[in-house]
Image (cartoon, rainbow, N blue to C red):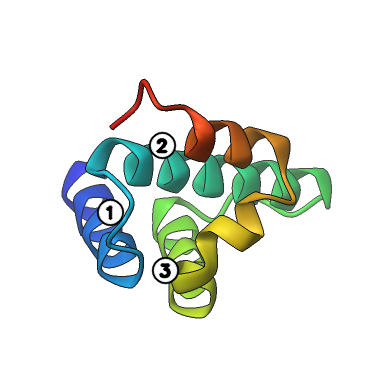
Amino acid sequence: MSEERQALIEKLRLKDPALSEEKAGMLIDLLREDFEATYAKAGYEYQGEEMSKRIVEQWIDNYGDRISEVAAMNEKYAAILKNDDIH
């Protein structure tokens, strides 16, 4: 998923240029993991990386320019955005 991951990172950074590539990558990974975990907990069968990519892409389209606001509601995401060691 490395090419697809990079495309998602670039898309997120276009929506929120203040995000570094590293922070955007970490957010993409967390979004994907959260979706897959939630989907599994709901009892659905794993639909593969393509489904995860589509959902994360949808979230970027809908919330990418407000990712800081959305992340502030979740400790994991907020910690990434506040960490000055990650550029």
Q: Which residue is denoted by mark 2 in the rendering?
A: 26
Circle 1 is placed at which residue position?
9
Residue at x-position 27% and y-position 62%: 17
Query: Would you say the residues marked 1 and 2 are in contact, meaning their CB atoms lie under 8 Å apart?
Result: no
Q: Residue furthest left?
A: 3
Q: Counting residues from the N terminus, which is met first, the one under dot 3 or under dot 2?
A: 2
Q: CA distance from mark 3 to mark 2?
A: 15 Å
Q: Tell me which residue sits at (74%, 54%) in the image.
A: 44
Which amino acid, by three-letter code, is at mark 1? Ile
Report the residue that reaches farthest toward the right.
Answer: 42
Up/down of 36 relative to 15, above or below: above
Label number found at residue 57: 3
- The residues tagged by marks 1 and 2 sit, at their Cα atoms, a distance apart of 9 Å
Residue at image location 39% in from the left, 60% down from the top: 50
1 or 2: tag closer to the N-terminus: 1
Q: Secondary structure at mark 3?
A: helix
